[in-house]
Structures are given as C-alpha cells and as structure tokens.
Image (cartoon, rainbow, N blue to C red):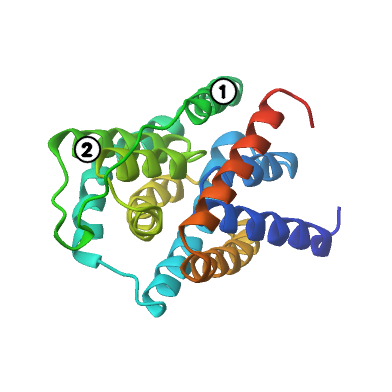
Amino acid sequence: MDEISITLILFGAGLAAGFINVVAGGGSAITLPVLIFLGLDSATANGTNRVGILIQNISAVYSFKKEKYSQFGLSLKLSLFTLPGAVFGALIAISVGDDLFNKILAVIMIGIMITLILPPKKVNYEDESNHRGSVAAFLVLFATGFYGGFIQVGIGFLMMAVLHTMMKLRLLIVNMHKVFIILINTIPALLVFMIAGHVNWKLGLSLAAGNALGGWWAAKAQVKKGENFIKVFLIITMMLMSLKLFGLF
C-alpha cells in the first residue's frame, strides 16, 4: 500500500475516532485495529494510538474553552487521581504479548457492551460550579487511569460513567472534564511507550491530524446541540459497538 493511501486511511480513522471519543467513547476500537492492520505489533499500535489521543484532546479542550466551557481547577484535580494508574497500566501494556493483548481486548470490549446495555439509574445533577466529588469516585478514577494506560479502548465510556453517575454531572460537563482528564493521563502513558520504542511517529502524526479535527468538531457540536445530541450519539455508538461485538458487521 502506498504512503498516500496509508495517510488517508489513518486520517479518516482518526477523524471518526476523534469525534466518537469526545462525544462518547470507543473510538480506539477503530484506530487500534487499523494500526495493527497496517503492520504494527500490538504494543506499537497501542503506543502510536496515544499520539492521536493526545492531539485529539488538546484540540477538544481548546474547542470547549473557546465555547466558554472550562473548569480547569476541577479537571486538573480529577486528572491527578488517574495519573499513577495510567503509568502503571502503560508499563503492564508494553510487557504483554500480541496474542494475550488481543484476547484481553476482546474480553474488555464484551464487558463494555454489557455495561452499556444495562438500564441507567436516575441521576439528580449537582451544582457543577461547587463540586467536590467523593472518595469512591476518586478511587474509581485511579482504576480508570490504569485501564486507560493499559489499553485505552472504551476509556471514554468508563470516564463518563464515573463523572455522570457517581459525581452526578451533566453530560456536556462530563465530556468537558473527560477530554482534559484523558489529555493529562495520556502524557505519562505516551512517555512510557516512547521510552520503550513503541511509537511509530510517521503513522501517529497522520492519525493525530484526523483525531484533532474530529475532537475539535465534536466539542463544538456538543455545545451547540446540547444534551439530547450527546444522548442520541451515545445510543447510536452503543448499538454499533454491540453489533460489531456480535460479529454482525
């Protein structure tokens, strides 16, 4: 396959994944298989994917800020709870073989599907301007950071579950915090993969260009269209992930 075709494939995959990740989650379910299909081993695909994730969330954070949606103090506080887990998860990921990694990925995807189809509980939203969170939520954020450092796929769904259900934040505010948190915990995870030599920068930057545009676009779309747009997009994303996991397409 020629370089132009590879670049276009990665840009397209990144564009779709960036939009999906910022509005909902699971975009790495597109990009990781594409990177593996292009010949990368699982560890290098995992590390290279982080380049796109990093740039995507920088773009999304900037886009949210331009739309006057930012609470950097709380976002940073939440991010700090994910950092130790993110480093540990990345260290484990680089030591896992391809076969085991792919099996773990398959199991995790099925687990995500099960959690997505469970009926949601009614949530009474708290005042986002004066939110302190709970000890349980912070502990779960640590575990979520580990998961993100290890495999990344579906981290958006897990982060949304913590912030929306446990911390009782509205979906738009959830996604505003989510992109900042994932941005911060992607940095040490990417450094671990870089030091281990598991990042293909040529492919990663092509992917990142698409991720950045998708993330920027998704943040603006959410602010303009509101909560209903996020809910509808989540439902569609859940359905597509479920159909793929069942092997129906």
Q: Which residue is mark 2?
A: 137
Tell which of 201 and 230 is nearer to you. 230
Q: Earlier in the sequence, mark 2 or mark 1?
A: 1
At label 2, which amino acid type do we have?
A: Ala
Find residue 126 and report its horizontal and vertical position in percent: 21, 51
Q: In this view of the protein, can residue 119 be seen by the observer?
A: yes
Q: Quadrant of residue 70?
A: bottom left
Q: In this view of the protein, can residue 48 be seen by the observer?
A: no
Q: Is residue 17 left or right of residue 12?
A: left
Residue 163 lies, with reference to residue 223, above or below; the image says above
Tell which of 184 and 92 is nearer to you. 184
Quarter of the image that includes the C terminus: top right
Q: Residue at the location (85% across, 58% down)? A: 2
SS at mark 2 in the image: helix
Find residue 38 and report its horizontal and vertical position in percent: 74, 45
Find residue 187 and report its horizontal and vertical position in percent: 36, 55
Figure label count: 2
Residue 177 lies, with reference to residue 116, above or below; the image says below
Q: Which residue is mark 1?
A: 110
Find residue 244 and report its horizontal and vertical position in percent: 70, 31
Q: Residue at the location (49% across, 51% down)? A: 50
